[in-house]
Amino acid sequence: MKASGSKPSGTGTSTANKAAERDAAALYAKGAQAELGKRYDAAFRAYVDAAAAFLRLGLRAEAGKALGRAEKIKAARQGLGLAACYEQRLVLKRGGSVNGLRVPLWEEGEGVSDVSELGTTYTDPDGPLKLSPEQERLLTVWRRPRDVLGEITLQSENISPQDVVQRVIEDCSLCGSLAVCLGYNARHRAKAMLPSLYPCTADGEPEVSPVGRYDLKVWFNGAHRRITIDDQLPFDPNGNPMCLSTVRPSELWPSLVEKAYLKLMGGYDFPGSNSSIDIQPSFQREHTWLKIYQSFQAGQTVLTAGTGRRPSISWANIELLTAHSYAIIDLREDDGGERRLTILDSWKSRQTIDHALAQLTLDKEQPVEKVDMTWDEFCNVFDSIYVSWDPGMFAHTVHFHGMWRPSRLSDADKEDSSQQVFRLKHDQATTKIPPQSDVWILLTRHRNDTRKASDYISLHVEDTSDLMKSNAVHLVSDRPAGTYTNSPHVLVKTSLSEVSTSFLVSALCDGTDEDVGFTLTAYSSLPMHWESAVEKLPFDQKANLYLPLKHAGALTSPNRSAALSPPGLPETRGGPRSKARLLLTMRAAKELPLNVTVVWGHGKRVFDLVSNDVAATSGAYSYGRAHAEVELLPGDYTVVVSTFEASQQGPFSLRVESSHDVWLQPIPQEGAGMFVKTVRGQWTGSSAGGSAKFNSYTSNPFFELHVPSASEIMIRLQSLSKSAFINVSVFFAPTSPPPSSPPRHLDKLLVSSGPYADAVSGAVTPLTPAPAGRYVVVPSTYDIGVEAEFRIVVYSSKTSVDVTSVR
């Protein structure tokens, strides 16, 4: 027999190859479109996927072309490199497993049109969603809407926010979100959320699928993903929808969006959530109104509100639901300057509320879900306001996808994995930066189990220009920053300036031993890029310590410091007087707000801080982690570690990395190794004699200090009841009158605490040799007539030293 040639014997393989070539070419075209639009992360992913598709087909030239474009993007993006980009792709792939279901990236899934060609009615291979207990109680069944309702439609132009009806599912946050999007569309002639449901027209309007299959395009776990459902919906035996719907149930768009979203969330037994990401930690009524009002009118935001878990909530004879989400569909200021909001409740199954709301209108027969109230009334009734912003406000968006990997690391390395640090930098640092160059940074925790709430995250954003300023003191603040939350989102807002062109961004996770993915997204008016902030310095010291009660508290209190000394030996790189680069990182439990500060303290304990004493600081107190960077000449320095309040205590670690040799050691507590005596007193009435510039100075309380044999002494005075400028001085006791009587004059001064000071730690004398004898200790305030309680602590090198009140 003779072979007839090498040409394939059938056309099936050829047709499949042509389709695969079209798909690969489409991926390349998608990458080119994204690159032209300066969406470089999306372009890189598309080019890499196109190269892989071409290689599978043996088209090496086309694959090389796609990889070449990817390499150019990698080189232009700076910092993270191809390996990191490949790892980011793996993070996104892993994010496609949610609640045991596969939720593919949007470009990876099979589209509705591909299935429609088959011409058969589609049934979701993942099976029906789990029903809620209330649905099961009402004997809910799955039916196709066309069989129950007859003609159906997905057109949305006739749907208003008031038409959205929440029935038996506890997804008020989703109902509120749909309602505010419909309100937004009506105000701004937009199509927010509508093009997310496929199939849809070229104008972005959803349309009825001929085979009953729908895809929801949703941003989840760092990327657009495809959630596929069939059109079967839950109905009760009488044909009433048992899911979110409109007042005209044949309008299916809200029902299908709800089903797809709840498939992602694990079923109709959805436990609920809030409906946005921007939860303000510190609420300022006037500032908040101005901000949300301006952005609402500009079409930059949509709003929902939440009630708290109180026994009952009422307003104007209306009983509001507890722990419930309400849509805010209007904000306005009337001619008289009155600020008002319109609130919408989509929950239809609460007849008492429907009845109460109906009383607000003349038409008693039509329950109205809208409630109108003033801004002040709103602030008194509701516990939260949730703000969702339009990313289109920003010209540039850049993502980084990473992974916290505690499951693969030793206990010693888990701490580093759970606190990952990156740099966000302006692409063109020499370009003049205009004012109002806002930068918003969003941390999103990926969720493979949407019901899990034990993972806590926090986002720290530090201006790198502040980190390197020697006098950047930010120790006084109303509250610490970087609170941990089990919400999947944390948003931090900052801005660029001429001196602030990069940020140190820390993504922190606590509470899990499993690998958890995350996405960092930067929204900015100017181009920016992510870089790795891992910096390896040759010398490293680490201390694991504990902040007990007497060590913790505000930085101005005593007893919280350690010593750092880079000696700068001749053999260290850079010469004996070159500056040492130092990185200081303090870590503790997520409940502890921390600060680390380097002080020009010559390696000795400090008790009070002023700006000129500070060499570097981590800035405002932040939960779980504090970080500072500085360049210093070799010498001895004092490192002060502290928590925000005196009652906050627990174990912590302090790590110091340096370009020079460095050593770190604790500084002994005040009076360590000495004997301590404490007495109390008060300035009151005639004994509040003031400073020595007043003739009444000798009216201040006197204490006799008895030193039987030569000793070293140090005395601290602290005001206990109020802040006051104080001083403590020690005089040789006069020979006449007897020391047991108050002297009318004072002899030679032995030692004084110096200028009057109002430090929280009080006033302290230096350690001073005291010959054997008797002395008079005089505590005083600078001004006459200042009444307060005080405490005197006497440290001595001999146990026989005693102090008693003379008057």
Image (spheres, grey):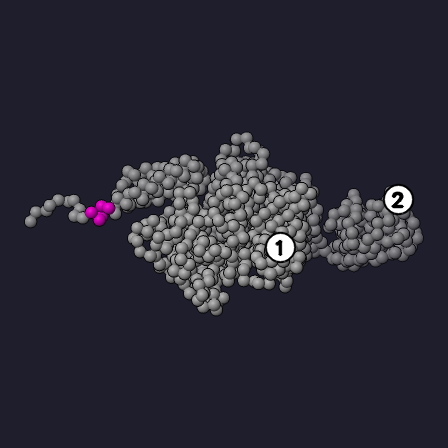
Residue at horizontal 44 percent and vertical 55 percent from the top: 250
Residue at horizontal 82 percent and vertical 45 percent from the top: 782
Kindly check if marks 1 and 2 are in contact, taking CB atoms under 8 A apart as contact: no
**Percent of width and height locating residue 697:** 88, 47
Q: Residue furthest left?
A: 1
In the image, 746 versus 437, the foreground residue is 437
Q: Residue 743 vs residue 466: left or right?
A: right
In the image, 637 versus 25, the foreground residue is 25
> Residue 424: in sight, yes or no?
no
Q: Residue 353 vs residue 147: left or right?
A: right
**Percent of width and height locating residue 363:** 60, 55
Residue 613's label in the rendered image is none
Residue at horizontal 62 percent and vertical 55 percent from the top: 362
Q: Residue 351 vs residue 702: left or right?
A: left
Is disc 1 placed on a helix, strand or loop? loop
- Amino acid type of the residue tagged 1 in the rendering: Thr
Query: How far separated are the C-alphas under marks 1 and 2?
Result: 75 Å
* Residue bounds of the magenta highlight: 11-15
Is disc 2 placed on a helix, strand or loop? loop
- Amino acid type of the residue tagged 2 in the rendering: Phe
| Residue 152 drawn in magenta | no
Residue 694's label in the rendered image is 2
Residue annotated with mark 1: 361
**Percent of width and height locating residue 496:** 56, 37
In the image, 367 versus 107, the foreground residue is 367
Crowding near the residue tagged with mark 2, few <14, some 14–19, many ≥20 C-alpha atoms within 10 Å: few
Residue at horizontal 88 percent and vertical 44 percent from the top: 694
Q: What is the magenta segment's predominant secondary structure?
A: helix
**Percent of width and height locating residue 131:** 45, 64
In the image, residue 360 sits, relative to residue 609, either above or below, namely below
N-term-proximal mark, 1 vs 2: 1
